[in-house]
Each structure stands twice: as C-alpha cells, then as structure tokens.
Image (cartoon, grey):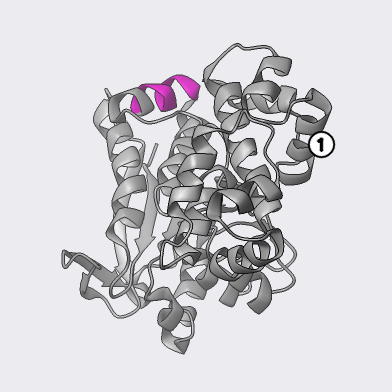
C-alpha cells in the first residue's frame, strides 16, 4: 500500500508552530511504524524554493504547479499574521485551489481558514479559526457557520482548527481516524499533550480578552481580587466599591477599558472557574456552583448553556480528564 500523501502548503512568514505542531504529530506516527510508514510528508508553495517562516527558518518547497495530477490524501494550509496578505494574492489562491482539487481531505491551521474561505471551500460549512479572528472571518465570509468555541471542526472532508497549537489537536484526530485511537493516544502521551483537549477556545479567552483590551492595566488589581474571591456573593456595586468609583462611573470606565460589561466579565470568570472544577475534580454540582460564585446549580446551568451550549453535567462528561 502506498503511503498516505500529505502536503503542507506554506507561504512567506507562515507561523512556524502552525507547521511544526501537526508535522510532529504525523512524524511521530511515522516513527512508530514497524513496517511501511503510513504517511509521506511533503512541502509546497505557490512558487517553490525556500520559504522563510516567521521565526526565520526556511523550508524547501516544490511549486504547486509541479505536483503531478495525482491523488493527494491530505493538504494542510497553515496560518500566521501574513495570511492577511497571502489570501488576497491571486497566485496564492490559484495555487491552493489546484492543490485542494487533487486532495481527498483538506485541513487548515489557525488563520489558514481565511485561505480556504477565499478559495470557496468553506461556503455553507462549519468552521473555526483563532478566537481573536472569528469575528473577522464571519464579517468577510458571512456564509460560513463559525464555531467559535471549537478546538477544531470537521465538516465533511474539510477540517479547520482554532488558534496555533490546536493544529496538534486536529492532527491527533486525523491519526485517530487513520490509524486508530491507540496510535493517537500513544503519540499524545509521547508529546505530553491531551489526546482530546478539555474545553474549548472560550475557556482561554475571557480573562485574556479583558487583559488585552485593558492596555493600561487599569483593572489588573481588581481582576486579581475577583479571581481570589469568586465564591463570595459579588455584584457590580461590590466591584465599584473596591475601585473607589460610583457604580455608574465604574461600569462606564470598565466597559471602555475592556470592551465587556463588569457583570458579563464576572459571569465569565465564574464560568471558567466552574469549568476547571468540572474537569479536574469530582465535586458535586452544588459545591462547584458555590465555589465558583454561582450559588445555585440552576444559575450555573443557565450560564453554561448560554456560553458553552451544554449543561455542566454534559461538559464534565465530555471534558473531564
């Protein structure tokens, strides 16, 4: 049997980790083989030659037009900040269109989804990209169903992954589909990563989002205090008192600084704390609701359904380590 032929499509300043993450997973599968390796890994680009990644390491590629009209099993389109120039370049889009026309399965890592979208591959499909870029993808390509909280999404032969390291998660899922769960689990153990990462993108974005938006760090001390006192019965007036502002002034200043209302931020912090307890402990639901500050299970359940789309019980079943 011929090895499963995989091409990585790269471009100038592509994010190295977008390439090396899934590449290492697939290479580890090759290293484990006790007979003919299942994967044959190759690199291509629009024009061929040495393509420099964002860290300055060059990758030797062949031009897409030099690839024979043969069946390719899988294509990876990688991402990086330079994708926002690349996906608007006609020669790059044409190269990707030819490449994917030969392939049975097409994958994007992080912002590589923009290239697939520009090539028309995501029309009417479910997809995901880095959580910071989901709104832009939705705005520029409104016919795509964006699954913001997903680590990766499979819609038929098209696989898209979220931010950067989630290319590893996607590649492990491919190995599981191709070679079985045992092989994927062995590779995950070797690389010291989750076989199925607990939670989704949303679990990483709430505190990080307000910290990014609050560029001056005006509310850093408040956020630290809130995280240390989540189990208390907090409300917006309590937070305003801590900052020494009136409730109205605090609410206005907080939203200006973080892009999120204080009540919304408080709920998100509580959600993340509850999600962590669900994944890492066997505490009963009522205890988790108390420790994360929801107080009542029903209140916690409604918040989970609103943000994550599943109940706390189902969240634990899916993601508990």
Name the quarter where the N terminus is drawn.
top left
Q: Secondary structure at mark 1?
A: helix
Q: Is residue 183 magenta?
A: yes
- State the image quarter where residue 76 is shown: bottom left
Q: Residue furthest bottom?
A: 90
Main SS of the magenta part reads helix
Residue range of the region highlighted in magenta in the rendering: 181-187
Foreground: 12 or 251?
Answer: 251
**x then y, percent, for residue 47:** 30, 80
Is 307 left or right of 121, judged from the image as shown? Answer: right
Seen at 59% across and 47% down, the residue is 202
Q: Is residue 197 visible to the viewer in this orientation of the structure?
A: no
Residue at which label 1 appears: 302
**x then y, percent, for residue 214:** 48, 64
Foreground: 65 or 183?
Answer: 183
**x then y, percent, for residue 114:** 53, 71
| Total marks in image | 1
Compared with residue 93, is residue 288 higher up or lower down, i.e. above or below?
Answer: above
- State the image quarter where residue 253 is shown: bottom right
Q: Is residue 293 magenta?
A: no
**x then y, percent, for residue 244:** 56, 56
Is 102 left or right of 7, judged from the image as shown? Answer: right
Compared with residue 253, is residue 305 higher up or lower down, i.e. above or below?
Answer: above
Seen at 63% across and 54% down, the residue is 148
Is 14 left or right of 243, judged from the image as shown? Answer: left
Please tell me how crowded label 1 is: few (under 14), some (14-19), or many (20+) other residues with Cα within 10 Å: some
Seen at 56% across and 42% down, the residue is 203
């Amino acid at each position: 049997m011929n090895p499963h032929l995989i091409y990585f499509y790269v471009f100038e300043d592509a994010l190295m980790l977008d390439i090396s993450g899934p590449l290492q997973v697939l290479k580890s599968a090759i290293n484990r083989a006790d007979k003919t390796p299942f994967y044959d890994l190759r690199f291509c680009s629009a024009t061929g030659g040495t393509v420099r990644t964002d860290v300055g390491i060059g990758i030797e590629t062949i031009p897409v037009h030099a690839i024979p009209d043969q069946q390719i099993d899988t294509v990876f389109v990688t991402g990086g900040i330079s994708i926002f120039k690349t996906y608007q370049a006609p020669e790059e889009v044409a190269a990707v269109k030819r490449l994917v026309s030969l392939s049975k399965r097409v994958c994007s890592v992080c912002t590589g989804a923009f290239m697939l979208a520009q090539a028309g591959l995501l029309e009417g499909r479910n997809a995901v990209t880095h959580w910071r870029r989901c709104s832009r993808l939705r705005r520029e390509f409104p016919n795509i169903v964006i699954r913001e909280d997903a680590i990766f999404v499979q819609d038929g032969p098209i696989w898209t992954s979220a931010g950067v390291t989630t290319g590893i998660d996607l590649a492990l899922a491919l190995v599981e589909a191709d070679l079985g769960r045992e092989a994927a689990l062995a590779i995950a153990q070797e690389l010291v990563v989750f076989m199925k990462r607990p939670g989704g993108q949303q679990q990483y974005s709430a505190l990080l989002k307000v910290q990014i938006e609050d560029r001056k760090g005006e509310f850093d001390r408040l956020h630290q205090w809130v995280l240390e006192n989540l189990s208390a019965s907090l409300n917006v007036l309590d937070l305003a008192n801590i900052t020494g502002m009136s409730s109205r002034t605090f609410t206005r200043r907080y939203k200006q600084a973080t892009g999120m209302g204080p009540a919304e931020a408080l709920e998100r912090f509580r959600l993340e704390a509850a999600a962590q307890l669900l994944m890492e402990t066997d505490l009963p639901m009522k205890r988790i609701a108390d420790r994360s500050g929801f107080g009542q299970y029903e209140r916690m359940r409604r918040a989970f359904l609103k943000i994550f789309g599943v109940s706390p019980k189902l969240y634990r079943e899916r993601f508990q380590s």
